[in-house]
Amino acid sequence: MSVSVEAVLTDIEGTTSSIAFVKNVLFPYSRARLLGFIKAHSDEPEVQRSLRETAREAGLAENDRRTIVDTLLRWIDEDRKATPLKTLQGMIWQDGYERGAYRAHLYPEVAAKLREWKTRGLRLYVYSSGSVQAQKLFFGYSTAGDLASLFDGFFDTEIGGKHERGSYLRIAQAVGTPPDRILFLSDIEAELDAAHGAGMRTTQVCRPPETCRSGAPHPCVADFSAIEV
Protein backbone atom coordinates (compact mmCIF):
# COMPACT_ATOMS: atom_id res chain seq x y z
CA MET A 1 0.00 0.00 0.00
CA SER A 2 1.49 3.33 -1.05
CA VAL A 3 1.81 6.13 1.47
CA SER A 4 -0.07 9.37 0.88
CA VAL A 5 1.49 12.71 0.08
CA GLU A 6 1.56 15.04 3.07
CA ALA A 7 3.44 18.00 1.61
CA VAL A 8 4.05 19.69 -1.74
CA LEU A 9 7.40 21.37 -2.40
CA THR A 10 7.43 23.63 -5.45
CA ASP A 11 9.93 25.50 -7.56
CA ILE A 12 8.93 28.95 -8.87
CA GLU A 13 10.48 29.88 -12.23
CA GLY A 14 8.95 27.85 -15.03
CA THR A 15 6.77 25.97 -12.56
CA THR A 16 4.35 28.33 -10.82
CA SER A 17 5.44 31.34 -12.80
CA SER A 18 6.85 32.48 -16.11
CA ILE A 19 10.62 32.56 -16.47
CA ALA A 20 10.11 35.68 -18.59
CA PHE A 21 8.81 37.67 -15.61
CA VAL A 22 12.02 37.03 -13.67
CA LYS A 23 14.31 37.56 -16.68
CA ASN A 24 12.55 40.56 -18.19
CA VAL A 25 11.18 42.37 -15.15
CA LEU A 26 12.90 41.43 -11.89
CA PHE A 27 16.46 41.03 -13.14
CA PRO A 28 16.57 44.35 -15.03
CA TYR A 29 14.95 46.12 -12.07
CA SER A 30 17.62 44.88 -9.64
CA ARG A 31 20.46 45.48 -12.10
CA ALA A 32 19.50 49.11 -12.68
CA ARG A 33 19.26 49.80 -8.93
CA LEU A 34 22.05 47.66 -7.47
CA LEU A 35 24.76 50.30 -7.16
CA GLY A 36 22.42 52.96 -5.78
CA PHE A 37 20.92 50.51 -3.31
CA ILE A 38 24.32 49.44 -1.99
CA LYS A 39 25.40 53.07 -1.61
CA ALA A 40 22.20 53.97 0.24
CA HIS A 41 22.22 50.91 2.53
CA SER A 42 25.93 50.19 2.96
CA ASP A 43 25.68 50.50 6.75
CA GLU A 44 23.06 47.75 7.06
CA PRO A 45 24.42 44.43 8.42
CA GLU A 46 22.68 42.26 5.80
CA VAL A 47 24.11 44.34 2.96
CA GLN A 48 27.58 44.26 4.51
CA ARG A 49 27.38 40.49 4.95
CA SER A 50 26.33 39.99 1.33
CA LEU A 51 29.21 42.13 0.08
CA ARG A 52 31.70 40.19 2.22
CA GLU A 53 30.32 36.87 0.95
CA THR A 54 30.54 38.11 -2.65
CA ALA A 55 34.17 39.11 -2.14
CA ARG A 56 34.96 35.75 -0.55
CA GLU A 57 33.23 33.76 -3.30
CA ALA A 58 34.88 35.78 -6.08
CA GLY A 59 38.32 35.95 -4.43
CA LEU A 60 38.23 39.74 -4.11
CA ALA A 61 39.43 42.16 -1.46
CA GLU A 62 36.56 43.13 0.84
CA ASN A 63 37.37 46.84 0.47
CA ASP A 64 37.26 46.72 -3.35
CA ARG A 65 33.66 47.89 -3.53
CA ARG A 66 33.69 48.80 -7.23
CA THR A 67 34.89 45.36 -8.33
CA ILE A 68 32.45 43.66 -5.96
CA VAL A 69 29.56 45.59 -7.53
CA ASP A 70 30.85 44.79 -11.03
CA THR A 71 30.96 41.12 -10.04
CA LEU A 72 27.37 41.23 -8.79
CA LEU A 73 26.23 42.87 -12.03
CA ARG A 74 28.00 40.16 -14.03
CA TRP A 75 26.37 37.50 -11.87
CA ILE A 76 22.95 39.00 -12.67
CA ASP A 77 23.75 38.81 -16.39
CA GLU A 78 24.89 35.20 -15.98
CA ASP A 79 21.89 34.26 -13.80
CA ARG A 80 24.40 33.08 -11.23
CA LYS A 81 22.76 31.20 -8.34
CA ALA A 82 24.87 33.00 -5.74
CA THR A 83 23.34 33.41 -2.29
CA PRO A 84 24.72 36.94 -1.58
CA LEU A 85 23.38 38.18 -4.93
CA LYS A 86 19.98 36.64 -4.28
CA THR A 87 19.88 38.30 -0.86
CA LEU A 88 20.59 41.74 -2.30
CA GLN A 89 18.12 41.24 -5.14
CA GLY A 90 15.44 40.30 -2.65
CA MET A 91 15.96 43.55 -0.76
CA ILE A 92 15.80 45.60 -3.96
CA TRP A 93 12.72 43.75 -5.23
CA GLN A 94 10.92 44.43 -1.95
CA ASP A 95 11.10 48.13 -2.68
CA GLY A 96 9.69 47.53 -6.17
CA TYR A 97 6.81 45.43 -4.90
CA GLU A 98 5.96 47.94 -2.20
CA ARG A 99 6.03 50.79 -4.72
CA GLY A 100 3.68 48.87 -7.00
CA ALA A 101 6.24 48.78 -9.82
CA TYR A 102 5.12 45.22 -10.70
CA ARG A 103 3.24 42.17 -9.48
CA ALA A 104 4.67 38.67 -9.59
CA HIS A 105 3.36 36.54 -12.44
CA LEU A 106 1.48 33.32 -11.68
CA TYR A 107 0.06 30.91 -14.23
CA PRO A 108 -3.75 31.14 -14.10
CA GLU A 109 -4.50 27.77 -12.45
CA VAL A 110 -1.79 27.90 -9.77
CA ALA A 111 -3.54 29.90 -7.05
CA ALA A 112 -6.69 27.76 -7.12
CA LYS A 113 -4.66 24.56 -6.96
CA LEU A 114 -2.56 25.81 -4.05
CA ARG A 115 -5.71 26.76 -2.15
CA GLU A 116 -7.28 23.36 -2.93
CA TRP A 117 -4.24 21.50 -1.59
CA LYS A 118 -4.18 23.67 1.51
CA THR A 119 -7.89 23.03 2.15
CA ARG A 120 -7.23 19.30 1.86
CA GLY A 121 -4.65 19.55 4.65
CA LEU A 122 -1.48 19.35 2.59
CA ARG A 123 1.45 21.44 3.75
CA LEU A 124 2.99 23.69 1.10
CA TYR A 125 6.64 24.69 0.74
CA VAL A 126 8.78 26.57 -1.77
CA TYR A 127 12.35 25.73 -2.82
CA SER A 128 13.87 28.26 -5.19
CA SER A 129 17.27 29.73 -5.96
CA GLY A 130 15.85 33.15 -5.07
CA SER A 131 16.24 34.15 -1.44
CA VAL A 132 13.57 33.28 1.11
CA GLN A 133 12.76 36.99 1.34
CA ALA A 134 12.30 37.18 -2.45
CA GLN A 135 10.05 34.11 -2.39
CA LYS A 136 7.81 35.59 0.28
CA LEU A 137 7.56 38.84 -1.67
CA PHE A 138 6.83 36.95 -4.87
CA PHE A 139 3.81 35.17 -3.44
CA GLY A 140 2.81 38.10 -1.24
CA TYR A 141 2.56 40.47 -4.21
CA SER A 142 1.34 38.13 -6.94
CA THR A 143 -1.14 38.75 -9.72
CA ALA A 144 -3.50 36.45 -7.77
CA GLY A 145 -3.16 38.45 -4.57
CA ASP A 146 -1.35 37.62 -1.34
CA LEU A 147 -0.70 33.86 -1.32
CA ALA A 148 2.30 33.87 1.03
CA SER A 149 0.20 32.73 3.99
CA LEU A 150 -0.67 29.50 2.17
CA PHE A 151 2.90 28.29 2.56
CA ASP A 152 4.29 26.56 5.62
CA GLY A 153 7.91 27.30 4.78
CA PHE A 154 10.41 28.59 2.24
CA PHE A 155 13.85 27.26 1.29
CA ASP A 156 16.63 28.81 -0.76
CA THR A 157 20.23 27.86 -1.58
CA GLU A 158 21.27 28.37 2.04
CA ILE A 159 20.09 24.78 2.48
CA GLY A 160 22.12 23.61 -0.54
CA GLY A 161 22.12 23.61 -4.32
CA LYS A 162 19.03 22.49 -6.18
CA HIS A 163 20.90 19.78 -8.08
CA GLU A 164 22.20 18.21 -4.86
CA ARG A 165 20.45 15.20 -3.33
CA GLY A 166 21.46 16.32 0.16
CA SER A 167 19.47 19.54 -0.15
CA TYR A 168 16.22 17.60 -0.44
CA LEU A 169 17.14 15.34 2.46
CA ARG A 170 17.76 18.44 4.60
CA ILE A 171 14.42 19.94 3.53
CA ALA A 172 12.60 16.73 4.46
CA GLN A 173 14.31 16.76 7.84
CA ALA A 174 13.49 20.46 8.35
CA VAL A 175 9.78 19.96 7.68
CA GLY A 176 9.65 16.74 9.68
CA THR A 177 8.21 14.64 6.87
CA PRO A 178 9.61 11.46 5.30
CA PRO A 179 10.85 12.20 1.75
CA ASP A 180 8.43 9.69 0.20
CA ARG A 181 5.51 11.77 1.52
CA ILE A 182 6.73 14.94 -0.19
CA LEU A 183 5.90 15.77 -3.82
CA PHE A 184 8.44 18.03 -5.52
CA LEU A 185 7.40 20.08 -8.56
CA SER A 186 9.86 21.61 -11.00
CA ASP A 187 10.45 22.22 -14.69
CA ILE A 188 14.12 21.20 -14.40
CA GLU A 189 14.93 17.52 -14.79
CA ALA A 190 18.23 17.72 -12.88
CA GLU A 191 16.41 19.11 -9.83
CA LEU A 192 13.81 16.37 -10.07
CA ASP A 193 16.57 13.76 -10.35
CA ALA A 194 18.15 15.05 -7.13
CA ALA A 195 14.83 15.10 -5.29
CA HIS A 196 13.98 11.60 -6.51
CA GLY A 197 17.41 10.44 -5.37
CA ALA A 198 16.53 11.70 -1.90
CA GLY A 199 13.34 9.63 -1.95
CA MET A 200 10.83 12.35 -2.82
CA ARG A 201 8.01 11.94 -5.30
CA THR A 202 8.42 14.11 -8.35
CA THR A 203 6.41 15.70 -11.14
CA GLN A 204 7.85 17.72 -13.99
CA VAL A 205 5.89 20.76 -15.15
CA CYS A 206 6.44 21.43 -18.87
CA ARG A 207 4.68 24.67 -19.71
CA PRO A 208 3.83 25.26 -23.38
CA PRO A 209 5.57 25.61 -25.74
CA GLU A 210 7.67 23.01 -23.89
CA THR A 211 6.22 19.50 -24.07
CA CYS A 212 6.61 16.33 -22.06
CA ARG A 213 9.06 14.05 -23.80
CA SER A 214 8.41 10.39 -24.35
CA GLY A 215 10.10 8.14 -21.83
CA ALA A 216 10.82 10.97 -19.37
CA PRO A 217 12.00 9.66 -15.99
CA HIS A 218 9.44 11.70 -14.03
CA PRO A 219 5.66 12.07 -14.34
CA CYS A 220 5.08 15.13 -16.52
CA VAL A 221 2.18 17.58 -16.83
CA ALA A 222 1.46 20.79 -18.71
CA ASP A 223 0.04 22.67 -15.70
CA PHE A 224 -0.99 22.33 -12.07
CA SER A 225 -4.55 21.26 -12.88
CA ALA A 226 -3.18 17.92 -14.14
CA ILE A 227 -1.16 17.15 -11.01
CA GLU A 228 -2.52 14.24 -9.02
CA VAL A 229 -1.85 14.26 -5.28
Image (cartoon, grey):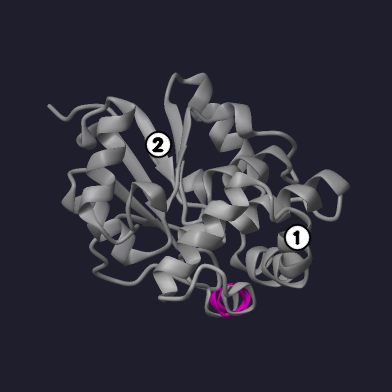
SS label for mark 1: helix
Q: What residue type is labelled 2?
A: Val
Depicted 224 relative to depicted 55: above or below? above
Residue under label 1: 37
Q: Earlier in the sequence, mark 1 or mark 2?
A: 2
Is-magenta flag for residue 229? Answer: no
Q: What stretch is highlighted in magenta?
A: 69-75
Q: The N terminus appears in which quarter of the rendering?
A: top left
Percent position of residue 211, x then y: 45, 70
- Residue at the limit of the structure toward the front, as seen here: 63
Residue under label 2: 8
Question: Most prominent secondary structure in the magenta stretch?
Answer: helix
Residue 55 visible within the image: yes
Crowdedness near tag 1: few (<14), some (14–19) or many (≥20) residues, C-alpha within 10 Å = some
Depicted 52 relative to depicted 112: above or below? below
Percent position of residue 31, x then y: 70, 71
Q: The C terminus appears in which quarter of the rendering?
A: top left
Is-magenta flag for residue 70? Answer: yes
The number of discs equals 2
Q: What residue type is labelled 1?
A: Phe
Percent position of residue 228, x then y: 38, 40
Q: Which residue is drawn at 48% across and 69% down?
A: 55
| Closer to the camera in the image, 133 or 176 | 133
- Residue 77 sits in which quadrant? bottom right
Q: Which residue is drawn at 55% across and 77% down?
A: 71
SS label for mark 2: strand
- Whether residue 228 sits left or right of residue 178 in the image: it is right
Depicted 47 relative to depicted 21: above or below? above
- Whether residue 23 sits left or right of residue 190 in the image: it is right
- Residue at the limit of the structure toward the left, as seen here: 1
